[in-house]
Amino acid sequence: RELRKKVIPAKPNGVSAKQNRVWMELRYSVFKKYGRKCMVCGTDSRLQVDHIKPKSKFPHLALDINNLQILCSECNTGKGAWDRTDWR
């Protein structure tokens, strides 16, 4: 019987290390461009980079800086993937 090696992805969600690096650099650029405050409520804690048009429905815009905004985790969770409000 042939032994099969278990393939472990570079990242748990299947994102390669290179893709993750591209995202992290883009994320940093978004914070430099817009600052470190939620664009909805103004808080400066638990910030996330939100996709205005969700990745699930618009995968071609996933790495487009014009589709990104800064939201805190509470506002981002409330917004969800159904709301496409541009808070910039």
Image (tube, grey):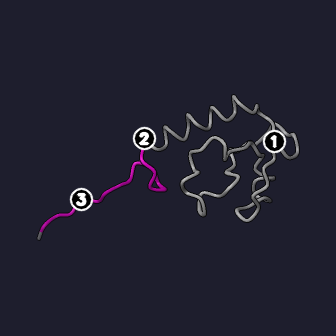
Does the segment drawn in magenta span residue 72?
no
Q: Image quarter for residue 53?
A: bottom right
Amino acid type at mark 3? Lys
As measured in the structure, the alpha-carbon distance from the residue carrying label 1 to the one carrying label 2 is: 28 Å
Tell me the magenta residue range: 2-17
Q: Image quarter for residue 65?
A: top right
Q: Nearer the viewer, residue 50 or 14?
A: 50
Residue at 66% in and 47% down: 67
> Residue 45 at x, y = what percent?
79, 39
Q: Identify the mark nearer the N-term, 1 or 2.
A: 2
Direction from residue 81 to residue 87 in the image, left or right: right
Residue occupied by mark 3: 5
- For the stretch drawn in magenta, the main secondary structure is loop
- Labelled disc at residue 38: 1
Q: Which quarter shows the C terminus?
A: top right
- Labelled disc at residue 18: 2
The residue carrying pointer 2 sits among few (fewer than 14), some (14 to 19) or many (20 or more) residues within 10 Å by Cα, namely few
